[in-house]
Image (cartoon, rainbow, N blue to C red):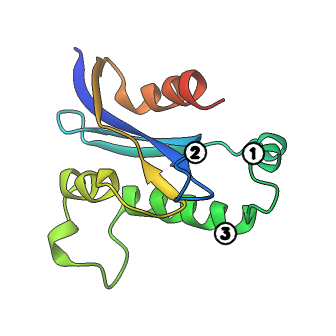
């Protein structure tokens, strides 16, 4: 059985005013499979070449927060974010920070949870 899914590529944007970005992660949601998952990869050499003054620890912390939001809404987060679909909507909403979601794309896969790693390999690594 194939499950439809939506995903966004998570982009590192060191200078929002310039709009230049580097793909660092993927967030995938499949309502039919009950999956909301994030995977990310930081190629430190590539990031340093792109943004020599990048805060790698801060970037890792922000990506961990995205992963945490995929697993469950953190304590103190608005009760409207209790479903996976609503959390995906929040994670995929445009923002003007150093981590930004790209456009929402769709696809289908027999195993959406495994599809996250395939997308990460194809779009980030």
Q: Is residue 108 above or below residue 76?
A: above
Quadrant of the image occupied by residue 30: top left
Q: First in sequence: mark 1 or mark 3?
A: 1
Residue 83 in the image, given as x and y percentages of width and height: 19, 59
Quadrant of the image occupied by residue 58: bottom right
Kindly identify which numbered label has been placed on residue 58. Answer: 3
Disc 2 to disc 1: CB gap under 8 Å: yes
Q: In this view, does 121 lie above or below 36?
A: above
Kindly identify which numbered label has been placed on residue 101. Answer: none
SS assignment at label 3: helix
Of labels 1 and 3, the one closer to you: 1
Q: How many marks?
A: 3
25 displayed left or right of 69: right
66 displayed left or right of 103: right
Between 67 and 55, the one nearer to me in the picture: 55
Instruction: Please give the name of the residue rendered at 19% of the width and 39% of the height, measured from the top-left corner.
Output: 31
Name of the residue lying farthest toward the bottom: 76
Q: First in sequence: mark 2 or mark 1?
A: 2
Instruction: Give the residue at mark 2.
Output: 20
SS assignment at label 1: helix
Mark 1 is surrounded, within 10 Å at the Cα level, by few (under 14), some (14 to 19) or many (20 or more) other residues, namely some
Q: First in sequence: mark 3 or mark 2?
A: 2
Mark 2 is surrounded, within 10 Å at the Cα level, by few (under 14), some (14 to 19) or many (20 or more) other residues, namely few
Residue 53 in the image, given as x and y percentages of width and height: 79, 63
Kindly identify which numbered label has been placed on residue 50. Answer: 1
Instruction: Please give the name of the residue rendered at 73% of the width and 67% of the height, measured from the top-left corner.
Output: 57
Residue 25 in the image, given as x and y percentages of width and height: 54, 42
Of labels 3 and 2, the one closer to you: 2
């Amino acid at each position: 059985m194939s499950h439809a899914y939506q995903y966004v590529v998570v982009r590192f944007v060191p200078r929002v005013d310039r709009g230049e970005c580097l793909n660092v992660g993927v967030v995938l949601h499949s309502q039919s499979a009950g999956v909301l998952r994030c995977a990310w990869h930081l190629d430190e050499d590539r990031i340093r070449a792109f943004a020599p003054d990048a805060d790698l620890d801060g970037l890792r912390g922000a990506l961990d927060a995205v992963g945490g939001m995929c697993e469950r809404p953190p304590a103190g987060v608005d009760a409207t974010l209790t479903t996976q679909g609503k959390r995906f909507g929040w994670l995929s909403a445009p923002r003007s920070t150093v981590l930004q979601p790209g456009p929402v794309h769709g696809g289908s896969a027999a195993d959406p949870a495994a599809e996250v790693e395939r997308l990460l390999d194809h779009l980030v690594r």
